[in-house]
Structure formats: structure tokens, C-alpha cells
Amino acid sequence: MTTYKISKQAMTAFLSSSCLRQLRINLVPEPIRKQQAGPDAMPEKHPRPGLADRAAAGDEWANTCVEDLIQQLPAGSVVEHHTVSAAGKTTYQNISVTQAGLAATAPSQVLVEHEYSVGQTFQEHFPVRSQAGHAVEFTELRPDLIFVMAPGTEGDEVLPDGSMRPILGNDHRRQLRIVDIKLNEDPGSGYLMEAVFYAVTLAGWLKDESLEHEFLVRADPGIWPGSHAGSTLHQAALGVLGQDVVYIVNR
């Protein structure tokens, strides 16, 4: 049986374009694509020139943003795990989101590279059906940053079915806000859709883990773009949660 993996890249590309053909191409594993022949064969995917260099530059920019947070926020505010290579390059490692780990978080903390799965709740609202001889699975999701915010902060929450509702002033739940770091100074709709996808799936994960009574996901995920105008971050006293630094998806 062939297993097709739905990655965040494939899903956000589909959400941006609604192109079923593109989705089908993105889902077919490369080894299977190369084995196909005839009129129904999938076209080969050729990496765009300079893509590896751009990805490396994106990683370097993301590291810079995280280092800014570590330097400016109080000790212990940034929850991360990193390694340093012999050449001095810092790599932030994936951290699995767990019930115990999330329960131990406090408002004003920032979770870096925390990973969670697309669970049953999301798939009930957005079903992806397997066919004979084929299975479909989602890959793990890992937003760059998850900000933990205090209960009662005004705004809307996103629900597992993708809808929204206002956050009441007496809501005692801690709030989670997705912020993804991108190299582009002017992120396009695909990046914004990716942040929305993270938010909806995280809301579903909370329900899967019976944490929906302790946490909510804010309906204003954002993008930290490829420039914060020099010292803007310092001048705004780490105003990364404000609209001057982060693109608000529903703005």
C-alpha cells in the first residue's frame, strides 16, 4: 500500500490555489512519480534555482529572530532546545508538544519549534479519505513560534472547524498565538494561509488532548516578515505581538 503524506507545504498550496491537480502532484512521493509512465504519469518536480540558498537564508533569519527574543525577554521566557555545530552554527531542535509540557507554560512565554500532530478532530471536520491501495497521512506540524498569552486578552478564538468566536473577558484559559517567521518582507497569501492552517490544526489538537478547557488558540495568527526595520523590535519593547511588527492574518 502506498502512503501519501500531506505536508504543510502541500496543504497551504492547495488552500491558496484550490488546484486539485497541483495537490495530487504534491502528494505523490518522488520514487513513485519516477516509476510512472504513460499519459497519467506525474510530471517530475525540479527544484527551483537558488532554492537551497534561499532556504538557508530563511533559517538564518529565523535564528536571528529567536536570538532577539532570547536577548530581550526575561530568562526562561523562550522555551527552546538548540545545538551548536563545530562551525558555530545554531540549530533549534524540534520539541514535541505534550499535555504536561503545555500545562507547565506561563503567559509571556514563547515556544520555539514545538511540534504536534494533525489528529482526529481536525480530520473529522476536514476529512481526507484513503482509497483502495492508498493511504493518506498528515505530517507533523511545527510552527516557528507559539506565544502563550494571558487569559482574558481581547480578541477571537479559532475553533477546530475553522470558525471563530469572541473571547470573553472572564475566559480563564491561557491563549496560544501562532507566529511564523518568513524571509519575505511582504509575505503573500500562501504564507498567511499556512499560519491559518497551523491555528486550526492546533485547536483540533487541544481537543484531542482534552486541553480545550485550559487553552484556546487565538484567531489572529501572524507572520514575522523578513525585516523589522533595524531596531524596531527593541524600540517596541518586544512588540512582536503588535501589528507594527507582525502581519495579522485577519487584518
Image (cartoon, rainbow, N blue to C red):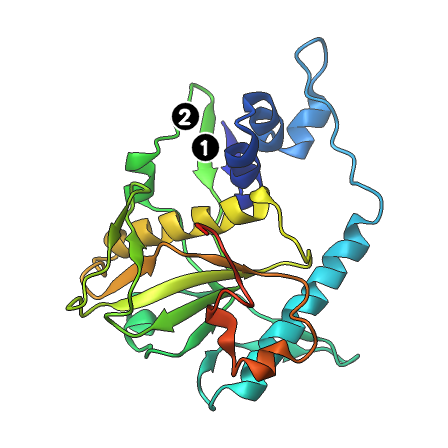
Q: In this view, does 225 lie to the left or right of 105?
A: right
Q: Which residue is drawn at 71% across and 68% down?
A: 60
Disc 2 crowd rating (10 Å Cα; few below 14, some 14-19, many 20+) is few
Q: How many marks?
A: 2
In which quadrant of the rendered view does residue 116 lie? bottom left
Q: In the image, residue 188 lies at what x, y percent?
A: 62, 46
Q: Is residue 240 left or right of residue 173?
A: right
Q: In the image, residue 17 lies at what x, y percent?
A: 56, 30
Whether tag 1 and tag 2 are in contact, CB under 8 A, the answer is yes
Q: In the image, residue 167 lies at what x, y percent?
A: 23, 60
Q: Which residue is drawn at 80% across and 41% down?
A: 48
Disc 1 crowd rating (10 Å Cα; few below 14, some 14-19, many 20+) is some
How far apart, in angstroms, are the residues tagged by discs 1 and 2? Answer: 6 Å
The residue pinned by badge 1 equals: 136
Q: In the image, residue 178 lies at what x, y percent?
A: 44, 60
The residue pinned by badge 2 equals: 130
Q: What residue type is labelled 1?
A: Val
Q: What residue type is labelled 2?
A: Ser
Q: In this view, does 116 lie to the left or right of 144?
A: left
Q: Which residue lies furthest to the top in this view?
A: 39
The label number, if any, that marks residue 102 in the structure image: none
Q: Is the residue 210 above or below the residue 43 in the image? A: below
Q: Is the residue 162 above or below the residue 54 in the image? A: above
Q: Is mark 1 on a helix, strand or loop?
A: strand
Q: Which residue lies furthest to the bottom in this view?
A: 75
Q: Residue at x 28, y 56 (%)?
A: 206
Q: Residue furthest right?
A: 49
In which quadrant of the rendered view does residue 235 lie? bottom right
